[in-house]
Image: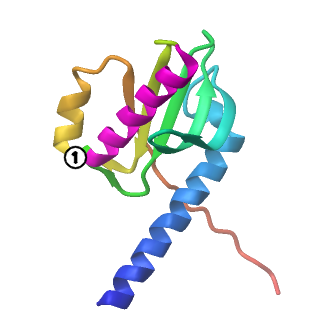
Amino acid sequence: IRRQRQMCIRDRLSFEQDLEDYLASNIEALEKGLKLVGRQVEVATGRIDLLAKDSEDNLVVIELKAGEANSSSLTQLLAYISAIRDEKKTENVRGILVAHDFADKVIYAVRLLPYVKLKKYRVRFEFENIKP
């Protein structure tokens, strides 16, 4: 069982890295007008997956979750937003939490946070025949 958990964790981390790689190259797929500022940006509260600027030059903190985003995922995003606001001395910072699904508590909480958006991703596989 422990080995299965380790494999699941590795798969999740790998997928999260794949998601980060994709969005770093295609940031506008997340929101029109976004421009990538940095990846794995160190702040006082940890490491931000992606940092971007929107079309109005506001900073956007992007936190990625391979599976379901729970309340600790939201807390992590809020801590990053707060740290960036302190470091950059600006209130013009918002966040996007990207996940495959969201815990009900997260959805309810974000209703009260106008500067946080939730984005759900979907994965689509395509297959092609290879002729030997």
Neighbor class of circle 1 (other Cα within 10 Å; few <14, some 14-19, many 20+) is: few
Residue on which the image places disc 1: 103
Report the residue that reaches farthest toward the right.
132
Vertical placement of 103 versus 107: above or below? below
Q: Position of residue 48 (x, y in %)?
A: 53, 42
Q: Quadrant of the image for the C terminus?
A: bottom right
Q: Position of residue 121 (x, y in %)?
A: 45, 46
Vertical placement of 18 versus 98: above or below? below
Does residue 125 appear to the left or right of 2 in the view shown?
right
Q: Residue at x 57, y 52 (%)?
A: 19
User: Of 38 and 25, which appears nearest the observer?
Assistant: 38
Does residue 76 appear to the left or right of 12 in the view shown?
left
Does residue 34 appear to the left or right of 96 in the view shown?
right
Q: Residue at x 65, y 43 (%)?
A: 39
Q: Is residue 75 magenta?
A: yes
| Dot 1 amino acid type | Ala
User: Of 18 and 94, which appears nearest the observer?
Assistant: 94
Q: Would you say the magenta stretch is mainly helix, strand or loop?
A: helix
Q: Secondary structure at mark 1?
A: loop
Q: Quadrant of the image for the N terminus?
A: bottom left
Q: Residue at x 71, y 75 (%)?
A: 129
Q: Position of residue 74 (x, y in %)?
A: 31, 39
Vertical placement of 8 versus 98: above or below? below
Vertical placement of 8 versus 54: above or below? below
User: Of 131 and 19, which appears nearest the observer?
Assistant: 19
Q: What span is colored magenta in the figure?
A: 72-89
Does residue 127 appear to the left or right of 70 in the view shown?
right
Q: Residue at x 52, y 58 (%)?
A: 16
Question: How many marks can you see?
Answer: 1
Q: Position of residue 122 (x, y in %)?
A: 45, 50
Q: Is residue 66 magenta?
A: no
